[in-house]
Amino acid sequence: MPEIQTKEQLREACEQYQKLLGSRLGLQGDDTRMILICGGTGCQASDSQGIEAEFQRLIAMNGLEGKVAASISGCFGFCEKGPIIKIFPENVFYVQVKVSDVAEIFESHILHGQKVKRLLYTEPASKQKIDTSEEIPFYKRQQRVALRNCGLINPERIEEYIATGGYQALARVLSEMTPDQVIDEMKKSGLRGRGGAGFLTGRKWEFARKYAGDEKFVICNADEGDPGAFMDRSIMEGDSHSVIEGMAIAGYAIGAHQGYVYIRAEYPLAVQRLEIALQQAREQGLLGKNILQSGFDFDVAIRLGAGAFVCGEETALIHSLEGKRGEPGTKPPFPAEAGLWGKPTIVNNVETLANIPVVYQRGADWFSAIGTATSKGTKVFALAGKVNNVGLVEVPMGTTLREIIYDIGGGIKGGAGFKAAQTGGPSGGCIPAQYLDTPIDYESLASIGSMMGSGGMIIMSDQDCMVNLARFYMEFIVEESCGRCAPCRIGNKRMLEILTGITEGRGTVEDLRELKALSETIMDTSLCGLGQTAPNPVLSTMKYFMDEYEAHVLRKTCPAGVCQKLLRYEILPAKCIGCTACARGCPVSCITGAVKQVHTIDQSKCIKCGACQTRCKFGAVVRN
Amino acid sequence: MINLTIDGQHVSVPEGSTILDAAKQIHMDIPTLCYLKLEKTRYLNQVASCRVCVVEVEGRRNLAPACATPVAEGMKVVTNSRRVLSSRRKNLELIISNHPFECLICAKSTDCELQKLVWEFGINTQRYTGERSKHEIDKSSGALKRDPNKCIMCRRCETMCNEVQTVGALTAFGRGFDTVVAPAEMKPVAESNCVYCGQCVSVCPTAALTGVGYVHEVWTALFDPKKTVIVQVAPAVRVAIGEEFGLPAGQDVTGRLVAGLRHLGFNAVFDTTFGADLTIIEEGKEIIERIESNQHLPILTSCCPGWINFLNYHFPNLNYMASTCKSPQQMTGAIIKTYYAEKMGIDPKDIVVVSVMPCLAKKYEAALPGEETYGIRDVDLVITTRELAKMLKEGSVDLRHMRDEDFDNPLGQSSGAGIIFGGTGGVLEAALRTVYEKMTGHELEDVNFTAVRGLAGIREASVEIDGRTIKVAAISGLGNTRKVLEKIESGEAYYDIIEIMACPGGCVNGGGQPYSEERDEIISLRIQGLYHIDRAKRIRKSHFNPAIRELYQSYLGEAGSRKAHEILHISGLLTDKKKVTH
């Protein structure tokens, strides 16, 4: 491939490469069969690489090169159903494919045009098989902007990114706009940071541009750490170039020539894809010196983090990047004034960066037309927990929780009742059923005691204990606190101890008062965002689910039946026939009783494993 | 100037000031714990980790740490609202909930800043119980004691070690509740690159960092009838120990101290200043030889074991420049166990030499393999000024009311030159007083080399001696030392003689000196105290110390003689002298 030197050459390359995407873009007259296999971390864990290899083998064996092609793609997002493959031009979507299924798909679908029905997606409600992804409810309500190329292109080929119009936003910015115009356009788009706090991206750039510095830096925050969140990983695995292009645009806007991607070492595939993409961008002249003959130099280097949650906080991230201990510093000064090596620096999140090229390709007006009054564009959520369709979903800001959970997520697993949605990770809160119809944006989530965060969304059913959930998040915080400031280091530990006491039946009414009082001090005096938001899961569950706390504290019971120490298994004498099945199944031998006699459980020895209840065929064992 | 109000009071402060600075200007005492500023040492610990100084700032969502929040025009600060007071108290209660409640038996009791703050806040209940951090106590070095269970993560030690001293032996380690400041990888101090300057101990608000104590061992020796227990006292001790008895800083209490030590039962009370004079004779000879042969210059002084450790760890390629002389402590010990023992007819094996030092590194130095003479340790036990004060109190000595007594002879005689060893620049000045006269053969009329005095970290001067310009420098603080050594390495700077002391200000500010919250002021007062003694001395040049002259005449022969080398120098290269662990 020759180096791309001008905007025109880039446009020509785009047209030329579009053939590669052919049937995927639905181009007329292109009947090349394309088999896309998800190459994300999740599907690779289920051997999607083996699936690809098998397709390649069969294509070669049948001499179909040039007519049929197989390629990996980024994540399709519907991870619940992985590994996923998609066949073009028919756009057929196969789910939970195994290597052993490949021969059948090849024989039946590729060679004879017959879809393999059993591998199609089954709609849980109607039990109907659905052929294409467009018709699957999981995808119907989504609008994929940040994830636009994930599951469409091969992330390891820059040609495919260019074919989608990639790097044309950069070309436009470099050839037609001054840095101030770039910033104005960004402010007009209303794009806000997708990493947590939701600061206006354009404003952040403006500050960094304003501060003088012989050097400035753009940092991509890829230290995704919220439990259950993986949208940033997916974007980097599926569309690294969009992040790189976003960084280059940001660099031009603020006057930086060096970017860093700070990414956790636990994301080896994302690192590898990013390395490939950087190398290709350099080879194509889209990174490096004098990009597209604009006189603008920009390059990006990768820095691996060691997996500390707190390094997602921008000042901690910068310290870590500098080789120091990854702990936050006091603000002000903000990184825009004195960041990396003391120079003006912007730290933008992966999803934010992936949105940036779109703003300049389609315009700020197009972008700001999506979303709500204060929150523009779309947001990717990692939908998880007790919901039928687990995966990555991207929806316009302002979509309601109900739409996400019921329309896209397919409702609560096993037909249980919805209890709450946890958003914003350990810094966020729990949203109860009464707010299911709240349009989700930065402000609405904050007003109901939660936050957008990076987009984790964990759905709780009536089988989940909210006190235990608060305890879980606090445990996470206690492990991940950097230990610098006293309220976070010690205060959260004391919170955890109190919560643990409550879930184990030692809670008092005074404990509930103390939890609130400690929360106030921790939020009010902690040094960084981690501590300042750490009590949110506790406060929001106390606000909406006080009855559960009271049950634990006053009646020493766990209504959801989750807190083991509060459970009590008992044998109903009226139902017990003395079959001894429970006693034989008890791992700690705490059930006594002769054959055909009523059995009893020794509560002092019982470990509350529930094995007796599972084994009893007469419903004689009850859990209280 | 920036204008703001604090609790309604208007205040104007320069841009870049913090809220705490502004409050101080109007005498408003916002409590602090982790924060510490030592202007003369250029030390600033502003990590804002304890959150005890939080204040309300109008328009700000959360409370702001006064110590680290810059003022802004029109800022409105409230320091005593209910929200502020309750948060401060809670944070303090949280801090003590992970701190051992053993104040009664703690080495830092009554000197502990945490204890003081808790007392000032009137906290009288243990609001939070729960798990406490459990770490091993580390006495591996025999000099520095780390009790991480008492660490409150103020990071003062780290700032001192890394930023002022540039030693880099301490860092925050671990995550969450168990985070603690420790040597790299939580290794024992003895396996780290700690140089034992003890400056971390001086700034530690609690007893997380203290010295390893030897008071018990000293009492045991004193009560052993078979032992002759001889004490030596370093110059810097006499101008500081009075503070422990409520006397003004810098007041010379030499005579009372001698009386007190005798009262404790020491068989002889000697002066390390004698060893300092002896050092000048031996080192002076080395200086003249190197200058005349123009080899191995600059010559670096080797009195300070903290500095020598730093040299070996960080600039091993320059360590040939250091003098081969033992330090005054070791010379004094060596002469006691040879010359004095012979003279008194005591088997040196029955002598216990106890030194009272302002220093923790001296404990380390005394235990080093090479620090012995004819197979016998030069110094047996080293206690600090602080430890001696405790011994005196335990032994019914009130320094305020002792009558002056004189040191024993012959190792009690000293010159003013030996006295000023206790402050930065003193060793250099003492050396110049002797070297000048030895090289020129003329009397030096004005003995005051004021250019090398003062508290600036690096002081340079040129001295004309015998038609030759001698470039000298006196440096205190290891960060300053690093700057100069880097310049020497790169060829950017040239010197003939350099005096280096690890502690900012020299031994008067050593890691074994009485704790003080007004250290900046006190360092100057202590140094003034030393120069005051020097001025009052009839003999102010080491080579005129009659006891030294007698020692050479009757025992050592010439300066630099074979015998002098056996007893007073470290044989071979300096790398053999001090253990190089990495």
Image (cartoon, helix red, strand yellow):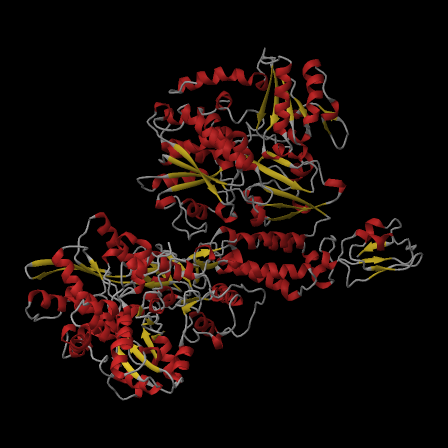
Q: Nearer the viewer, residue B381 or A180?
A: B381
Q: Nearer the viewer, residue A390 or B28?
A: A390
Quadrant assignment for the C terminus of chain A: bottom right
Location of residue A223 with respect to A291 vertically, above or below? below
| Residue A502, image quadrant | bottom right
| Residue B23, image quadrant | bottom left
| Residue A219 seen from this side | yes
Left or right placement of residue B193 versus residue A73 in this view: left
Left or right placement of residue A91 versus residue B308 in this view: right
Location of residue A244 with respect to B75 vertically, above or below? above
| Identity of the residue furthest to the right in this view | A596
What is the x, y in percent for residue B327? 26, 68
Left or right placement of residue A419 versus residue B478 in this view: right
- Which residue does the image show at 39% across and 59% down from the upper left? B158
- Which residue does the image show at 17% across and 67% down from the upper left? B431
Image mark count = 0
Left or right placement of residue A567 versus residue B111 in this view: right
Q: Nearer the viewer, residue A433 or B441?
A: B441
What is the x, y in percent for residue B38? 32, 64
| Residue B521 seen from this side | no
Location of residue A617 with respect to A504 vertically, above or below? above
Q: Nearer the viewer, residue A52 or A416?
A: A52
Quadrant assignment for the N terminus of chain A: top left
| Identity of the residue furthest to the top in this view | A29
What is the x, y in percent for residue A554? 72, 63
